[in-house]
Amino acid sequence: MALVELRNVSKIYHLGGEEIRALDDVSLDIQPGEFISIIGPSGSGKSTLMHILGCLDSPTRGTIKLDGTMIHDASARELARIRNQKIGFVFQFFNLLPKLNVLQNVELPMIYSGLAGRERRERAVQALRMVEMDNRAKHRPMQLSGGQQQRTAIARALVNNPKIVFADEPTGNLDSHTGEVILELFRKLSQEGRTIALVTHDPEIAAVTPRRIEIRDGKISKQVDAKLAGLDRVNAERGTRSAEHNTGAKLPAAN
């Protein structure tokens, strides 16, 4: 069963008598443990899609199921509960509270969940250890590099053990080397079975994910699954070898 199911989802705004479809009849499934990217230029609808997938907004039309529960018509209070318990977010600008240290920033989602102090600290330390930031637990954000701040934000996103993590341009405020380190961390988390969706305008970043969903003009314009593409290539090569064996003729290699 899919972790996330969107069916015929649209998000429509009315500005000055004009109808603007930020999303237009989008259907999409995300499976548990998938590592995907949602890619598109500015204004394509990718951020609107992330907001709806992440329960930050509701669709005008269509249905959404998350972890077996219909959420498209949930109240604002219920959406807040779902975000806290089932969804993690990582943003371009980290969004760490400057007056709190690293450990306290990571504890925040659990405070909203009502967890006791001792359990909060234990889970926060564990999350920081996962991203190799436990040795910076007492530092404040201004004492950290950009990469360290983003690692802290990732720990905060993971601390409630969410069903899915959305990372919105997670390398956009980092230099290229640090960005590669952060992408490698997401790859590692994916290999551990976590469901992760990267939202980006950059094809090079999207290329790190096995599955890419391209958005244009509010619609899914293309989906690329590297695993299926690889399987198609293997099957094509097998077919070529079989034909060569049967005919004795050398056929051109598949492109």
Image (cartoon, rainbow, N blue to C red):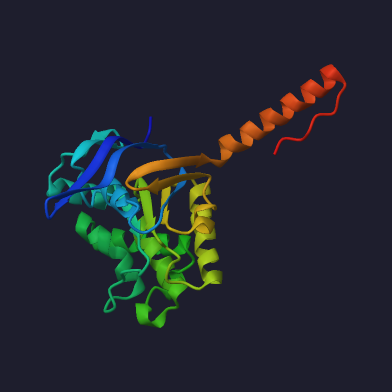
Q: Nearer the viewer, residue 31 or 255?
A: 255
On the image, the x and y values in percent for residue 52 come to 26, 47
Image quarter of the N terminus = top left
Residue 111 seen in the current view: yes
Vertical position of residue 228 compared to residue 102: above or below: above
Q: Nearer the viewer, residue 46 or 31?
A: 46
On the image, the x and y values in percent for residue 72 come to 20, 39
Q: Quadrant of residue 47?
A: bottom left
- Residue pictured at 23% horizontal, 56% vertical: 115
Q: Quadrant of residue 65?
A: top left
Residue most toward the right? 248
Residue most toward the front? 17
Vertical position of residue 34 compared to residue 159: above or below: above
Label count reads 0
- Residue pictured at 43% horizontal, 67% vertical: 172
Q: Quadrant of residue 62?
A: top left
On the image, the x and y values in percent for residue 183 come to 51, 60
Vertical position of residue 229 compared to residue 131: above or below: above
Q: Answer with left or right where residue 33 lies relative to residue 253.
A: left
- Residue pictured at 47% horizontal, 60% vertical: 130
On the image, the x and y values in percent for residue 60 come to 18, 42
Q: Answer with left or right where residue 144 lies relative to residue 16.
A: right
Q: Nearer the viewer, residue 245 or 24?
A: 24
Residue most toward the top? 246
Image quarter of the C terminus = top right
Q: Answer with left or right where residue 82 lies relative to residue 249.
A: left
